[in-house]
Image (cartoon, coloured by chain):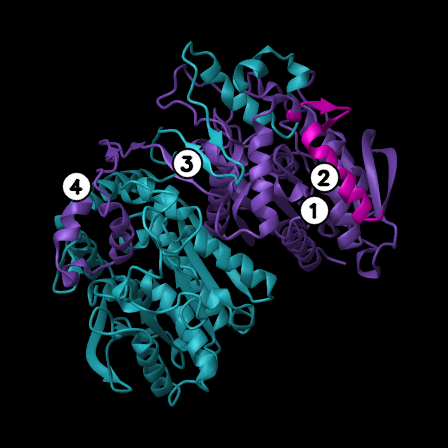
Chain colours: A cyan, B purple
Amino acid sequence: MVIRFVQGLGKTALTGLIGFTLAIASPLAAQTVTPPAVQVDEQGTVQVPAMTVPVSSMLSPEAKAYVADHLRQMQQPAMVQQKNGVPVFMEPYLARQNMLFRHTRADTKIGGVHVFDYAPTAGIAPRNRHRVLINLHGGGFSGCFPGCAELESIPLTTLGQIRVVSVDYREGPDHRFPAASEDVAAVYRALLKQYPAENIGIYGCSAGGMLTGMATAWFQTHGLPRPGAIGIFCAGTTMSGFAFGGDADFVTAPLGEGRPAPAWPPTEPITGSKLSYFAGVALNDPLVSPGFSDSVIRQFPPTLIITASRGFEFSAAVHAHSQMVRLGVDADLHVWEGLFHGFFYNADVPESREAYDVMVRFFDRHLAR
Amino acid sequence: MVIRFVQGLGKTALTGLIGFTLAIASPLAAQTVTPPAVQVDEQGTVQVPAMTVPVSSMLSPEAKAYVADHLRQMQQPAMVQQKNGVPVFMEPYLARQNMLFRHTRADTKIGGVHVFDYAPTAGIAPRNRHRVLINLHGGGFSGCFPGCAELESIPLTTLGQIRVVSVDYREGPDHRFPAASEDVAAVYRALLKQYPAENIGIYGCSAGGMLTGMATAWFQTHGLPRPGAIGIFCAGTTMSGFAFGGDADFVTAPLGEGRPAPAWPPTEPITGSKLSYFAGVALNDPLVSPGFSDSVIRQFPPTLIITASRGFEFSAAVHAHSQMVRLGVDADLHVWEGLFHGFFYNADVPESREAYDVMVRFFDRHLAR
């Protein structure tokens, strides 16, 4: 109805900020069927009609095929099961990374915690001799070691020509918060004997991105210096009862994971996280969700935030960036259009290579030598 | 069905990157009704079921109310009509800006082109004496002068303590591309007699953000030096037959504007832009959509990109940033979660103030003195 009215107006009446909006509507108006109206209630809740959304027009050909594959894979339970800590759908990504990026890996302990200690086969670059990166892997705080650890560490050690220590931190369901933060602190404390804090970077994807912020907050209250720079990838600094909160809890479910959005209002009370690692834990504790505390975030070191518009962490990631900028933190945001949670695990997509470049350059720019 | 299967698995089988995803699904699984399946075809096109999406949990209280108001206003044709170049829904924003931000405005010509020439009542800051900002207003290349021009210029001249020249460039339907680029070049050429190029910033929102990139490309082929820094707000550097392209053509229609997403596949062939200013113009001309040319974008000066996740420009904005970063341009991206196209026209929302701060600091940091 809105559209019909607009069509009836003269061209000069169609001017304004909304010139683009009105122009968009015209193909629909040409149809004889009235499109479903969008209902908006007093609180601004939108009843979004069903819609058909193609892969983003802005992706590389490789990424378009990758999105199509990923969406279908996420609908196959067998693909997301893990074999020896590697989800089935990640196996080919890991094989390719091992082929593309020559590295060595030591299976060892640092600070009493099990780690994988990576170095590039070609050797560590002179500028990185006194630098190290700590990787905190993804996996929903309950698995994906070594799968996610490998996929996050191998490109950075090789392309960045830098040592990467990936921490096999304690997870659910056997362990609860703050076990992982304690493990990261133990590794960090041990590395501090060898490297100044400002020469150490910490980063991770998904649960590992979340844990990067959690560990940074943990250090503040446990007498540890802040690291030189951190990377929060595929995550933000807060969690919701669904996942990471914001619009992404809804919009990215079908578009990034091939599953329906959660019901709203919720069909049962939402109390805390669904992840076993956080059972009984208050999500608004700044050691869990540092983004709920301005005074904690204000002390963060330079922070790189990497996300994708179909990633279910997207809202939390961009919101974390806005908060950091507001508080004067040197925060740098990169969003890949049309891609999904953890997209850069696949090294054969040009967009993943762009992300690796951004990561490598960020730490090179911000870590002391 | 996927969800039911997952529920039947033991806890340890639920580990992996997708731990978060699986956790999200559990409230739905508790229902007796099977949620609608999400269909994904071979090309990755997603049949998104209807869903209910509340205002983002991450917004300030003021912004939550603002989103609700905006969505309802966009459904009322009378609100988007213009009176003397000011859309009705923008009238209160303009009244508030005039109350909040004390400034002077000269109605004059520069380089033969009609402009509004703004200065802060409190005076131009010493560091800005040899600097000027050129504003290119929004309005779909056919209107919203002075409405959009005022709303984009008043906060920056006052908060930034800097001269702002807002250009009343030629628009559709009376004029066609490249009339606006010519007008911007004429004003720029005139200001270059008074200011070095590196002391001049150019910025705008929506059509004005698009025109900022177009003018920057235009200068390259018309013997003009590049400006010191530019701000592409509420826009990207490419256009689509719908609007700005990417997922945002679909997702942000209901969530940012309260209207249905366009049909896909299109019900009629899409040929070029729907905007009168671009009638008969090839959208892939780099002087129209500079983002289609790496060699043009590579020469861009430091660029600030500001968008919002419900803005229909969102995909183009983040994609422009990715492209610039890939090409080595000093580009800075800021995304406000849950807000919509041109949200910062309303100065009473904390998020708008954050955006003004980012704009002011960006130009202060990048323009020469």
Mark nearest the camera among 3 and 4 is: 4
How far across and how far down the image is residue A159, in percent? 33, 64
Q: Chain letter of disc 1?
A: B
- Asked if the residue at tag 1 contacts the one at tag 3, i.e. Cβ–Cβ closer than 8 Å, the answer is no
Q: Amino acid at mark 4?
A: Met
Instruction: Find numbered disc 2 in the image and state the secondary structure of the residue it sits on.
Output: helix
Q: What residue is drawn where x is 46% and y is 11%?
A: A30
Assess disc 2: are there few (<14), some (14-19) or many (≥20) residues with their C-alpha within 10 Å of its C-alpha. some
What is the number of the mark on residue B247? 3
Q: Report how far apart the C-alphas of labels 3 and 4 lie in the structure.
A: 27 Å
On residue B1, the disc is 4
Q: Which residue is mark 2?
A: B93
Amino acid bearing label 3: Asp
Magenta residues, start to end? B79-102
CB-based contact (under 8 Å), mark 4 and mark 2: no
Q: Residues within 10 Å of mark 1 (few under 14, many from 20)?
A: many
Is residue B176 positioned above or below A248 on the image? above
Looking at the image, which residue is at 66% across and 45% down? B226
